[in-house]
Image: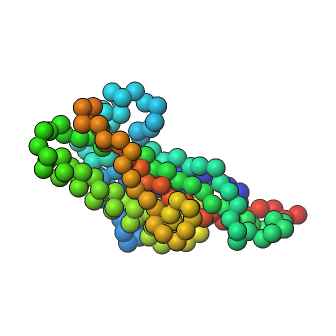
Amino acid sequence: MSGYRPNVIANAVIALLEGVTGIVRRVPPDMFKFGAFEGQPEAALKAFAVDTRYAHRFDVILGDWDAHGSTPLSNTGPYRNTRLPITIDIWTALRSTSQAEARRAQRELIQADANTAVQALMYRNNLNTDANGTETGIISGLLMGPDASGLHPKWSTVNEDWIAQIHRSQIVGTALVKIHQNVS
């Protein structure tokens, strides 16, 4: 692999969350579907979220990469290692209810599904390639915590709107990416 290929990295995350790829810790194919994104009208997001074929809709956002400390100091070597922040925005339909137990059960299901995604994202070699077999350059083929620590990606709730019936959450992690570069 030569150079930085963000589409390959994003496609690898999409394929893993859609259940197309994954070695051991896999995501069921009907749990997540790519296609929702920030800036869409609320009606469109709700239409995506209530699609009964999938439990959740998501988007993958790659941040600005930054040099990692393991890159050779001279930066004239054949590669450099970078930290690449990755955010996965997730939209889930909520069933409006006034029952506290029903709300709690919905939240619990969302958290369980997010945990399945986090486990797949942090499993070694799950992100080595995209669905076409193109190498991503992600070192160890996994996501780490948001600060590139050895910890797992972090999931959190962003917004829970019971009136609009949309739950928004996100998974934030970091990929260490080996980028080959010309030396002559």
* Residue 11 on image: x %, y %: 51, 52
Check the picture and name the quadrant holding the C terminus.
Answer: bottom right
Q: Is residue 126 or residue 101 the one in the foreground? A: 101
Going 63% across and 60% down the picture, which residue do you hit? 83
Instruction: Identify whether 15 is placed above or below 125.
Output: above
| Count of number-bearing discs | 0
Asked whether, in this view, residue 40 is left or right of residue 10, the answer is left
For the view shown, which residue lies furthest in the right direction? 184
For the view shown, which residue lies furthest in the front direction? 100
Going 28% across and 46% down the picture, which residue do you hit? 54
* Residue 53 on image: x %, y %: 25, 44
* Residue 71 on image: x %, y %: 73, 68
Asked whether, in this view, residue 1 is left or right of residue 104, the answer is right
* Residue 146 on image: x %, y %: 52, 59
Check the picture and name the quadrant holding the N terminus.
Answer: bottom right
Going 57% across and 65% down the picture, which residue do you hit? 148
Q: Is residue 49 or residue 112 the one in the foreground? A: 112
Q: Is residue 19 visible?
A: no
Location of residue 46 by image quarter? top left
Instruction: Identify whether 23 is placed above or below 15.
Output: below
Q: Is residue 173 visible?
A: yes
